[in-house]
Amino acid sequence: MEGTLFLPVGPLRGVTRVPGDKSISHRAVLLGAVNAGPVEVTGFLRSADTLATVRAARALGVTVEEHGPGGEDLTVHGLGWEGLREPVDIIDVCNAGTLIRLLPGLLASTDMFCVLTGDESIRRRPMARVLEPLALMGASTWARGGGRLPPAALCGGRLHGIEYTMPVASAQIKSCLILAGLRADGVTVIHEPGPSRDHTETMVRYGGAQVQREGDPLGAGNTIVHPLPGDLNLGPIAVPGDFSSAAFLLVAALLVPGSRLTVDRVGLNPTRTGLVQALEAMGARVRVVVEDVAGPEPLGSLTTSQQELTAVDIGPDLVPLMIDEVPIWALAAARARGISRLRGASELRVKESDRLAATAELLRALGVRVKEVEDGLDIEGRPEGWTRGMVRSRADHRLAMVGAVAGLASDEGVEVDDAACMSVSFPDFAATIRSVSTPGR
Ligand code: S3P
């Protein structure tokens, strides 16, 4: 495959926006599908992952209308749980981990038979973490490799509330159990070893469900799910810009000389913004302004400018709050003065790619010294910049964008072997960069 060369750019300037949040877009369609009636969604992310969720909802008999100039407004004609139709074929989630983990929870209380599969990367990702607790609740589940890997199948039924300790802090496992717990015949208690994004809780509460959290809001705790009498009654859902996409622009602005950039209308849910803390601990100043808490997530603006960075240690407390931003944080660390250490990050090994190995390989291709350990990385920063490189994305959208930002902030350019996979979460990445970059280097 032909690579794409990302050349150094002049200062990134002005105010820009990023497409809708991927996690919230998935949830808006999935919860919209079981809502008591139509749900209006604005700012929906149109990407490969979230369009797979629209197709899944349609396969369940739900009408999803697309409006707006780019189709980023939806009307999801919810049928309630009882109104869903058994899919007549296998559901292909493509590359969407969130879809393959949440859908079994949504369907576990129906008596429908459903088979789920996805692309090569999805078929390497662990499924037992959601199928085992669903089986404890009363669903019948199957999966390849002794119940571990997709394709996976599910036949739902009458569910019981359970008390369950999650093996890892994961929003996907927690969300799957919340969706099933809403339909169980008793209370479900989920013990969480650490924090994870809380978009599912926020959205189902917005729809009238009773879900409580005990413990540290940004640490370990319990999520308690009460059975929902009837269906959800969701108001309109305004999807904020995706913090995880904004993260690439933020780090680009920190690294490209002369930059000062604002990204506005970004989701600022504190379970997502750990990267800001990590960058601040490296000496960066990032201005965060919360503007609105409607529809039902907080959103606002992020502003930063090019600055010198110093090394930092990132541990297991912060990793879950920046789980998808670790690769782009690592690029910032690769420019910082000193050795940055990341620990408690073994979950990154089961993302779209093994993101610890992939990040280490990418940085080494730029001439950065990196030591990889089981649960993290040691990164020796090169404040002087990096060498011209050819990097591998391993078909992982976030790795491809790390390579692109490395190119923008380089002296001679960086080639990314497969940049097309950016369409999984940020199809307009290159156009957004062009719109804020100025000539000059
Ligand atoms: C997601 C949760 C995260 C994240 C993924 C999206 C979600 O995974 O890595 O990209 O939408 O719930 P875990 O919380 O399961 O680690």
Image (tube, rainbow, N blue to C red):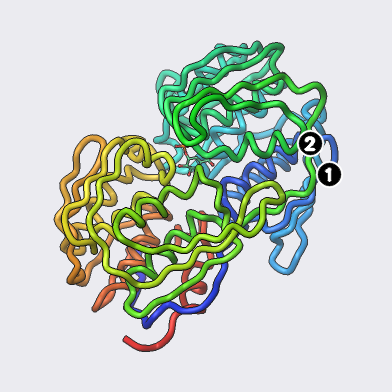
- Secondary structure found at label 2: loop
Q: Is residue 264 above or below residue 397?
A: below
Q: Is residue 249 left or right of residue 56?
A: left
Observer-nearest residue: 286 or 420? 286
Residue 2 seen: no
Residue 206 seen: yes
User: Residue visible at 45% across and 20% down?
Assistant: 147
Q: Amino acid at mark 2?
A: Asn
> Quick one: which residue is furthest to the right in this view?
37
> Contact, CB < 8 Å: mark 2 with mark 1?
yes
Q: Amino acid at mark 1?
A: Pro
Q: Is residue 283 above or below residue 130?
A: below
Q: Is residue 63 above or below residue 201?
A: below
Mark 1 — residue?
Answer: 38
Mark 1 neighbour density, 10 Å: few (under 14) some (14–19) many (20 or more) = many
Relative image position of residue 86 (x, y in whole percent): 73, 29
Relative image position of residue 63 (x, y in whole percent): 80, 45
Mark 2 — residue?
Answer: 35
User: Residue visible at 55% across and 11% down?
Assistant: 136
Observer-nearest residue: 186 or 212? 212
User: Residue visible at 25% across and 41% down?
Assistant: 376
Observer-nearest residue: 32 or 376? 376
- Image quadrant where one finds the C terminus: bottom left
